[in-house]
Image (cartoon, coloured by chain):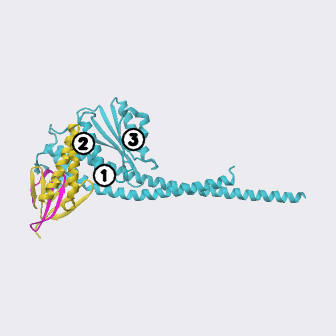
Amino acid sequence: MPSLKDLRNRIKSVQSTRKITSAMKMVAAAKLRRAQEQAEAARPYAERMERMLASVAGRLQGASGAPKLVSGTGKDDVHLVIVATADRGLCGGFNANIVKAARLHIRRLLADGKTVKILCVGRKGRDSLRREFRDKIVDMVSFAGQKRLTFADASGISVRVAEMFEAGEFDVATIFYARFRSAMAQIPTAQQLIPVALPEITAEQKADDKTGPQALYEFEPDEESILEALLPQNLAIQIYKTLLENAAGEQGARMSAMDSATRNAGDMINKLSQTYNRQRQANITKELIEIISGAEAL
Amino acid sequence: MAETTNFELVSPEKLLISQPVEMVVVPGAEGYFGVLPRHAPLISTLIPGVIQIYEGGQIKERIFVAGGFAEVTEDRCTVLADEAIPLAELDRAAIEQRLKDQKEDLQAAKTDAEKAALQEKIDVTNAMIRALETGH
């Protein structure tokens, strides 16, 4: 049975924990708003990029001279797995879920006899994958301590990936991240980056386009060079998008984790205070009994 | 008001301009081209240069872009810029300093890939200076 003093200390420490978690929750809420705004602002570019890519690719469909980024290397032996996680913990199952999805994927690839290379974006992913796949991690990129994610950061990663691809270091690249559905729900998702899954021109888009068939576009200088410039840019924008979704998801996950931590601390304080009060009352009763029985004995 | 075409300027980080314009001149890879309403559909890459927005036959706004893509259809012109800065916000002294730094970096660069990347940056910076001097 803990003494009264122990209980008092315990209550005090849980109270300060609650203060910290509730402050973290509020910070995360503010950061979440900012991250969401940033993700929102990046959307128009991605949309228009997709539209343009569809028009250019529509022209090249079936052409034999398609760039490697689209057609792939024709092999499927070496896989690059990019695992995008947060740099910091204390955000519920956010990192663990992404890592779990990536780990399953990697194990399956290994079982199929493929070679796997891992590029970690964010410290947490590397920390948890290091144990099992130490020799497969080629590099780690971290933006810890950086207030805002910029396009240049994403672009840097994309340039690296493109260079590795050019050098023939892998055949297929997949990125693992958490799709941001709401502040409460982030869904671990795998997206194939290379070869690029080109957006198909839907019938709806065709009807929308007053200019009629896509083939009417003129190209300057020509389709191939435009596609060659568009694809790396598209890669960068895709990575940028996943990183932004991740950043928003991280803050959302942290916010709900800290919210339940705050609530748990509150419950615990209630329970502890009840025990404390009972114990105190028991002590008083015990003393009274001692006094009364002492008086009766006389 | 004359006939207009919808001009949009987008950078990866946000939508910068979305407004109807009478004419816009864009630095295409094969030369500057003007876009008027009912322009033929066109997709072009851009070189570092200045986008000029015209109103009433006068240049209303000049924006420097570091490269990107332009998509033109009959009723709109969309520019996806890698980096876009209004000309008025460019700082001459800072740019010249940057050019000097980049040239020094180029001297220090070892691999061809590094040199090519730096040369590209220098071209952009040079284009900025040219834009400041001549307005395009």
Q: Are marks 1 and 3 in contact (CB under 8 Å)?
A: no
Which numbered mark, 1 or 2, is in the foreground of this view?
A: 1
Mark 2: which amino acid? Val
| Amino acid at dot 1 | Thr
Marked residue nearer the N-terminal end (1 or 2)? 1
Residue A101's label in the rendered image is: 3
Residue A7 drawn at (x, y percent) = 65, 54
In the image, are marks 1 and 2 on the same chain? Answer: yes
Tell me which label, 2 or 3, sits earlier in the chain. 3
Q: Is residue A91 magenta?
A: no
Q: Which chain is yellow?
A: B
Secondary structure state at the residue bearing disc 1: loop
Q: Residues within 10 Å of mark 1 (few under 14, many from 20)?
A: some
Horizontal and vertical percent position of residue A177: 36, 45
Instruction: Tally the numbered discs.
Output: 3
Element at label 2: loop
Residue A264, horizontal then vertical, whole percent: 54, 54
Q: Percent position (x, y) of residue A228?
A: 18, 43
Residue drawn at x 71%, y 58% as measured from the top left: A280
On screen, residue B97 versus residue A25, left or right, reads left
**Quadrant the C terminus of chain A occupies:** bottom right
State how far apart marks 2 and 3 are (Cα).
21 Å
Give the chain of mark 2. Answer: A
Q: Which chain is cyan?
A: A
Mark 2 lies on residue: A196
Q: Which residue is mark 1?
A: A150
